[in-house]
Image (cartoon, helix red, strand yellow):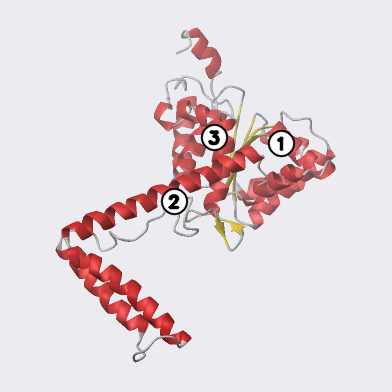
Amino acid sequence: MSLKNFQYEAIMRDYNQKQFLHKHEQDEHIRLAEEKVPRLGQIRREIAALGLKKARLVLGIGGGEDFDLESAISALAKERKTLLLENGFPADYLELHYDCPICKDTGYINGEKCACFRKAAVDLLYTQSNIRDILEEENFENFSFQYYSPDFSDPASGITASEAAHSAYDKAWAFIESFAEEFNNLMIYGDTGVGKTYLTHCIAKELLDRSYFVLYFSAFDLFDLLSRNTFQKDVQSADMASFIYDCDLLIIDDLGTELTNSFVSSQLFCCINERIMNKKATIISTNLTMEDFLDTYSERTFSRVSSNYTMIKLIGNDIRIQKRLLGGK
């Protein structure tokens, strides 16, 4: 991701702060442990002395017989571990710990950005775009079935709004709980105001809290980004566009509200198809019926969606209107 300087610097300051805090924590652990068990300080100094002695022998500037440095250090490390455990400390108490053991809180692995850097970058963008604030309000803790009447039924299927909402809720949680083991996609459809976007927000928050890489776009913003990446070729759009194909979960909200043309139709197919091929999950919400979806986009796009997505239909009266009638509650 191509970040602006102030965004990149904010992330790197966070990494530097993590390194500082963990080093301070390690120093404090060493002080406390060696204060209680003086032999631990001796072991630390002996290990350092052994390394220096071995280096001098290798360079031919030291006297004495050669020795197996690894075995000598291993014996001292074993004694250190025993002393720690005998005195009530964890075996790894003196080690330097990291939030991300993969990159050791540097953000980079062999010159490439670590996955934790990508997550930090996306999290920063979420925060700066106020999406995080939305998820604080729109989540499963605040989800309510009270707006889905058991008296409102779908003429075609006979299913009530309450039954549809409970089914959608269960399917959403099944999607979340099986996310790590099973590849699945969701198509959430229904009339305006029945809670489709709210449900996608609920799912997004649960998976973000489980440290998955989630990207959320309205259909308009998604195709605007893909258009800029195609026709303007700016670096920032290119980097963000690459994440559209690589993120763990892509959410496309309000599909069908954008200005649909041949470019949008082809880009939607490419996005859906590539993510299916790479087994990357996608959630689409739309006001379109399946018949309208087929008419609006290509038959091949409809075929890929209908054969690879779990369909979730929400029905009922407009929740926003219901809330206004209840005084905004």
Q: Upstream in the sequence, badge 3 or badge 2?
A: 2
Give the secondary structure at mark 1.
helix
Give left or right: position of 104 versus 43.
Answer: right
Q: Is residue 17 above or below residue 155?
A: below
Residue at position x 48%, y 60% in the image: 102
Give the secondary structure at mark 2.
helix
For residue 19, the mark is 2
Give left or right: position of 235 versus 137.
Answer: right
Q: Amino acid at mark 3?
A: Thr
Q: Nearer the viewer, mark 1 or mark 3?
A: 3
Q: Upstream in the sequence, badge 1 or badge 2?
A: 2
> Label 3: few (<14), some or many (≥20) within 10 Å?
many
Q: Nearer the viewer, mark 1 or mark 2?
A: 2
Q: Nearer the viewer, residue 305 or 128?
A: 128
Q: Nearer the viewer, residue 85 or 163?
A: 85
Give the secondary structure at mark 3.
helix
Give left or right: position of 148 versus 3.
Answer: left
Residue at position x 84%, y 42% in the image: 231
Q: Nearer the viewer, mark 3 or mark 2?
A: 2
Q: CA distance from mark 1 to mark 2?
A: 51 Å
Res. 13 in view: yes
Q: Amino acid at mark 2?
A: Gln
Q: Position of residue 287 (x, y in %)?
A: 65, 29
- Residue that mark 1 sits on: 293
- Residue that mark 3 sits on: 200
Residue at position x 41%, y 86% in the image: 57
Q: Is residue 11 above or below residue 45?
A: above
